[in-house]
Image (cartoon, rainbow, N blue to C red):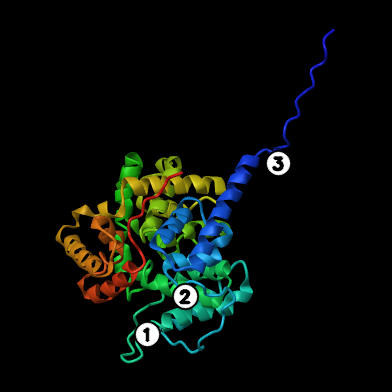
Amino acid sequence: MGKKRRKKRSSPPDKGGPKVERGERDNHDQTLRLVNELLSSERSPDGVKRLRQVAVVRGLGSTRRFAWPILVGCEVGVPANAGAREGEDFEHRDAQVVTCDVNRCLFHDVHKRPSLRWLLNACVGVGTNSESGEQDVYYYQGLHDIASVLLLVLGSERVAFDVLRHLVKNHLRDCTRSDLVPVLESLDFVFDLLKRADPELHDHVRSSGVPCHFALSWRLTWFSHDMHNLDHCARLFDIFLASHPLMPLYIGVCCLVAERERILAAEAEFATMHQLLSKIKPTSRSQQLSELIRRALQLHKQVPPHRLGKGEGRRLAAFRGLAGAMAARGGAGASGDDLTWAWLAMVSFSGLAAVTTATAALTSVLSFWDGNMQFQLL
């Protein structure tokens, strides 16, 4: 009688992924080394570019407190505990609205509400011209959601203020103008992207006659209003801070595609469709969120922002010429349409009356953003 074969012991389920865990640890260590390199030395364009790629493709994890300020162009080396406030009296027309919004947000830590109120009032109030009294940065409902995530992740009022101040002048510039017309006009790109991503779904949604206003919160809140998981919010912020201002539209369109069966089963009627689309948001499960991000990056590669709105004709051509002129003045080392179009969305919907403000904003952006974003997709 032969020997009894010993049964091979299988790995416990909770320890069945050592390769994945090791890979995640290696990614974190690499990101940490990159962030430390940027903090301890003069910031190089190549280093910032690599950090953007990491932020978009893999996420920044525990390095966000130091990496987010670098991504938006804040000064390197600001200590994490720098929380000294520079004054308390920031007056603006929407101060009362800020108070009301603050009182119903910050689901994680209500004790941070005074800090959030100061952060928002300071960011908007600093945007007021002391000589003319004219307000340059305007508060909008939804900015408090973005500020909440910044405050909770960064942990410092001062650092959160620096990051938010950059955002309201760059990524969120069209949102902080005196009205939301530029943002509403940019939402037309949702249908362009949806048609490319899923023609059948696009035709069904368009047949209902619903406009793109259901996507307004995508740009105003970066999905932070409807997602109650800080880690998932922060993962999306990694992408939005490191990429084009229109990236929330790519994520939102991929959310619609992920729910295509549910949408196609709904009646193509205005009210029904608007209500359904307004409730669709990124999934709360991290595995599905990763897949959603992967699809959004693929869509971004297939239809980059400079290919959106090709039918705008002379209006877009005029802004393209403006962007090109600014690139020639402030974009040393950058080249071609990749640079001039990388931030075109920030100025292309704001009308000729806003050219001066948009030009100044574009100049500051070009000083640290090379515009040539090449993502290594998952």
Task: Please tell me which residue lies in front, 167 or 285.
Answer: 167
- Residue farthest along the right direction in this orientation: 1
- In the image, is residue 324 above or below residue 4? below
| Residue 199 placement: quadrant | top left
Amino acid type of the residue tagged 2 in the rendering: Asp
| Residue 105 placement: quadrant | bottom right
Amino acid type of the residue tagged 1 in the rendering: Thr
Look at 56% across and 66% down and name the residue there. Answer: 153
Amino acid type of the residue tagged 3 in the rendering: Asp
Q: Position of residue 222 (x, y in %)?
A: 45, 61
- In the image, is residue 59 above or below residue 78? above
**Judging from the image, what secondary structure is the residue with disc 3 in?**
helix
Look at 47% across and 81% down and name the residue there. Answer: 121
Q: Position of residue 335 (x, y in %)?
A: 25, 58
Give the residue number, with chain letter if any, for mark 1: 128
Is 150 left, or right, of 332 in this rendering?
right
Give the residue number, with chain letter if any, for mark 3: 14
Evaluate if marks 3 and 2 touch, with contact meaning CB atoms under 8 Å apart. no
Q: Between tags 3 and 1, which lies in front?
A: 3
- In the image, is residue 22 above or below residue 107? above
Look at 41% across and 83% down and name the residue there. Answer: 126
Say whether disc 3 or disc 1 marks the residue closer to the N-terminus.
3
Spatial CA distance of label 3 from label 2 is 41 Å
In the picture, the quarter occupied by the N terminus is: top right
Give the residue number, with chain letter if any, for mark 2: 162
- Residue farthest along the front direction in this orientation: 41
Task: Please tell me which residue lies in front, 143 or 366.
Answer: 366
Is 116 left, or right, of 250 in this rendering?
right
